[in-house]
Image (cartoon, grey):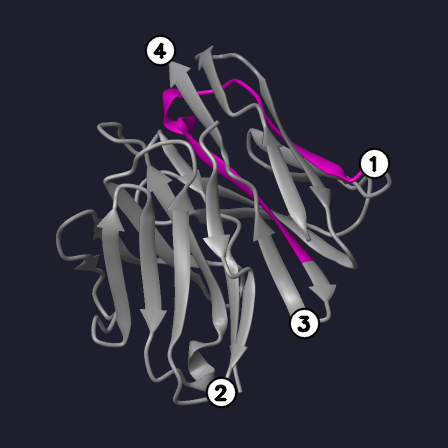
């Protein structure tokens, strides 16, 4: 069964700190890895990663995938209180049932002023 | 701790039949659970908020008679897709909020893939 594990479960930092969120996975026939940010209504899409070693960047957020070691990290530099959210990782894979998407449980990030 | 499970992880059903998806908080109680659906281009949409012991609150545009939600206990919410059609094929994800906490204390299930043939 496909599995996605995020760590840490929760994280409390102060504004200006840099954080690294981890996502490891065990899936068959990997296709892509997705990062989301959940604040209020529904998770908003951040990044999709398909190739190893290529960093995706958006402002203070960046993410990279390691397909050999089966993990991805999401970095947030110079954190702000508005970064407080649940960050979700999901892995898309292909199995006998077709295209599957498996979510990790999320990392809860709290940024204090 | 704080694990949320979903069952089944994937299901294939025929058009016109109903499918039930379960969302369980395994080691905490959750008065409030949420159901989401994935749309193309990776976006996720909140379908409804499930409240233990009371009726679910549906988002605008979500048919409550089609997507039946039951939150019978503090650890279980179910989503039943009634009279499923191929356009209902999607990923359905649930999350559970720890009792008395805000959005921060929310944990997600792994998701269920529904395919309607």
Callout in the foreground (2, 3): 2
Depth order, front residue of B105/A60: B105
Magenta segment: A69-92
- The residue wearing badge 4 is A113
SS for callout 3: strand
Q: Tell me which label, 4 or 3, sits earlier in the chain.
A: 3
- How far across and how far down the image is residue A109, in percent? 45, 24
SS for callout 2: loop
- The residue wearing badge 3 is A98
Query: Disc 2 versus disc 3: distance between alpha carbons?
Result: 16 Å
Total numbered labels: 4
SS for callout 1: loop
Callout in the foreground (4, 3): 3
In this picture, residue A51 sits left or right of residue A22: right
Residue at the extreme front of the image, as rendered:
B73
Instruction: Determine if marks 2 and 3 fall on one subunit.
Output: no
- The residue wearing badge 1 is A69
Q: Which residue is drawn at 64% across and 42% down?
A: A4
- How far across and how far down the image is residue B46, in percent? 33, 56
């Amino acid at each position: 069964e496909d599995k996605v594990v995020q760590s840490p479960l929760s994280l409390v930092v102060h504004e200006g700190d840099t954080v690294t969120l981890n996502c490891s996975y065990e899936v068959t026939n990997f296709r892509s890895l997705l990062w989301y940010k959940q604040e209020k209504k529904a998770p908003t899409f951040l990044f999709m990663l398909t190739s190893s070693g290529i960093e995706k960047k958006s402002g203070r957020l960046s993410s990279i995938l390691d397909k050999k070691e089966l993990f991805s990290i999401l970095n947030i530099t110079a954190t702000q209180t508005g970064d407080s959210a649940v960050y979700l990782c999901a892995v898309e894979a292909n199995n006998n049932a077709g295209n599957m998407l498996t979510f990790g449980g999320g990392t809860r990030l709290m940024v204090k002023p | 701790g704080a694990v949320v499970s979903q069952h089944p992880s994937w299901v294939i059903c025929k058009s016109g039949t109903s499918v039930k998806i379960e969302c369980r908080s395994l080691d905490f109680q959750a008065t409030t659970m949420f159901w989401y659906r994935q749309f193309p281009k990776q976006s996720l949409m909140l379908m409804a908020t499930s409240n233990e012991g009371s009726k679910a609150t549906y988002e605008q545009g979500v048919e409550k008679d089609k997507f039946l939600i039951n939150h019978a206990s503090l650890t279980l919410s179910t989503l039943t897709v009634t009279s499923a059609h191929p356009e209902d094929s999607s990923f359905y994800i649930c999350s559970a909020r720890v009792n008395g906490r805000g959005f921060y204390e929310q944990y997600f299930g792994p998701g269920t893939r529904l395919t309607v043939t």
